[in-house]
Amino acid sequence: MDIHRIEAAAQRLQGHARVTPLLSSPFLDEIAGRRVLIKAECLQHTGSFKYRGARSAISALPEDQRASGVIAFSSGNHAQGVALAARQFGVAAVIVMPSDAPKMKIANTRALGAEVVLYDRATQDRDTIGHDISNARGLSLIRPFDEPEVIAGQGTCGLEIAAQAADLGVTAADVIVCCGGGGLTSGIALALDARAPEMRVRPAEPEAFDDVTRSLASGRIERNASQSGGLCDAIVTPQPGALTFPIMQRLCGPGLVVSEEEAQMAMAQAFSRLKLVAEPGGAVALAAALYHADQLEGDTVICTLSGGNVDRGVFLHALQQYGDA
Amino acid sequence: MDIHRIEAAAQRLQGHARVTPLLSSPFLDEIAGRRVLIKAECLQHTGSFKYRGARSAISALPEDQRASGVIAFSSGNHAQGVALAARQFGVAAVIVMPSDAPKMKIANTRALGAEVVLYDRATQDRDTIGHDISNARGLSLIRPFDEPEVIAGQGTCGLEIAAQAADLGVTAADVIVCCGGGGLTSGIALALDARAPEMRVRPAEPEAFDDVTRSLASGRIERNASQSGGLCDAIVTPQPGALTFPIMQRLCGPGLVVSEEEAQMAMAQAFSRLKLVAEPGGAVALAAALYHADQLEGDTVICTLSGGNVDRGVFLHALQQYGDA
């Protein structure tokens, strides 16, 4: 994995993925005690950065292989990214989703033309289901993060951060990235290592699902005790990826861990100060920027707001509980 | 007023105003029955397009005059735009606001460093209050819409629409603009007349405050029966402007009128499909695009989502009532 692969992905995504804005608000600067720049990936197609990696991977498949269709496992954001990218190429997409995934994510994935296969996390084995379908129909598996072309696609977000920050005169900063399996984090880290080497990438995770933070601290892959649950469904993964972890180990600074309460406070701030809808997992980096300022360095912090696919009830609750924060 | 004045404003705004994205969603296209492109001005500094006109006007003042400070009358969005632009130039801003303006708008205006003078719409005369303060302190009045440099500033939004639509291969479309006094509408119309002459600007207004639509139909300035009230506070004005109306008469197509219910349905769609926070008055153009498709022409419609400064309770109500729409 190097910058050339990310640049190649950027070429393939040109005119398809959105260049999302890098936003700010004087009110957020005041809370954080430094300048805060927010990369608004909730404005990406399908409402999260996942479209970048999905389109990158599907566009990199040999044409005859792509024509047979693709399959993905996802609780939601990767599902929607794969569904849209597959539809744009006119190929079939099968998405294997847990039946307890957020309703909006299941509905959107179906509406984007994918065939959704639901399974019960407690009683069924996802991999067996997927393997059977995939073999029967000759589908290509699009992994959510541990796949070079997916990491390269997410890395295009880092190319944009480097260019947009430079336009504002910012070349050094902590860059906090909402982190699940590490696809976005490692992709951005690779891009910034080449384009803005004075920036330092910091993964942000929710409490109880801080496998990357603990793995970076211990130097080996650590697992989460729980495999599901919590508000931050988008970034709950069992452990760092085999491909993403070595990249993060080489390039990323200490992780940051926020509470679900802080994630919801950040959602309320994104609502009132940025006019953006963030999902809990997409708000953890902003939460770290706002509420863990003592663990950051420098006069500017950059954070990803990585997704906005939140069920209405969850959003209403965050606003009602934390809207005055 | 011509395109050169708008181009000059764009020069002065460069590096200050944001180039806001032109967004879309396949789900909105399906509701509208055509392609819908949304100019997300709620992502502009201070949460509405008003910053463009305010910064344009303040930056156009002679330096010695600007140094004495500025004054504005506004129920909220213009107030915040003027407050931020004045602070950026290091000059004083006095904003005369009705005491029943949305709380968030009053609080934000103060937080941006302006001196806010509240008055009671029922018992006090705004102009007398403003005139007295202005004379005593030598402040320059920044009008909300009937001022060439303000219209030119709002027109920069039209320059961006023309360029961004062209990037998508769109050169002809109905362009629906949320319309109060007509500053944004006339500015965009002037810009598109020069840069995208096959586009047609259509003002959108809420029921009971459809003065521009009726004025365009009758050919003379018509007033609204009520001067205040309604959910769409941002775009409630007594009548079209003396400068803006002739421009709209020359360049704009028939107006579109939406209900408050439709504006709130559009807010709910902006939440779920665009991940954007819209205020009611900022959602009327999207409402017209989605729910008045029979009054539009062409296979693409462009609309402004002009502001996102909404009190939490109003937003929660829209989502609770219309979130399943």
Image: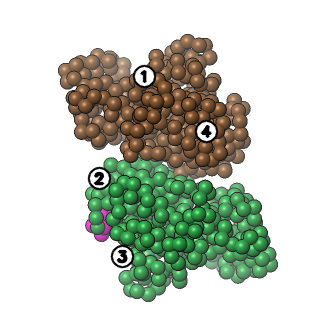
Chain colours: A green, B brown
* Chain identity of mark 2: A
Residue at the extreme right: A136
Q: How many other residues sit within 10 Å of disc 2, few (<14), some (14-19) or many (≥20)?
A: few
* Chain identity of mark 4: B
> Taking A127 as reference, is A185 above or below it?
above
Q: For residue A30, which numbered disc appears in the image?
A: 2
Dominant SS in magenta: helix
* Chain identity of mark 3: A
Cα gap from disc 2 to disc 4, whole angstroms: 35 Å
Residue at the extreme front: B4
> Taking B301 as reference, is A2 above or below it?
below
Specify whether A124 is left or right of B118: right
Q: How many other residues sit within 10 Å of disc 4, few (<14), some (14-19) or many (≥20)?
A: many
Specify whether A68 is left or right of B23: right
* Chain identity of mark 1: B
Cα gap from disc 1 to disc 4, whole angstroms: 24 Å
Cα gap from disc 1 to disc 3, whole angstroms: 54 Å
Looking at the rendered image, the disc whose residue lies closer to the viewer, 4 or 3, is 4
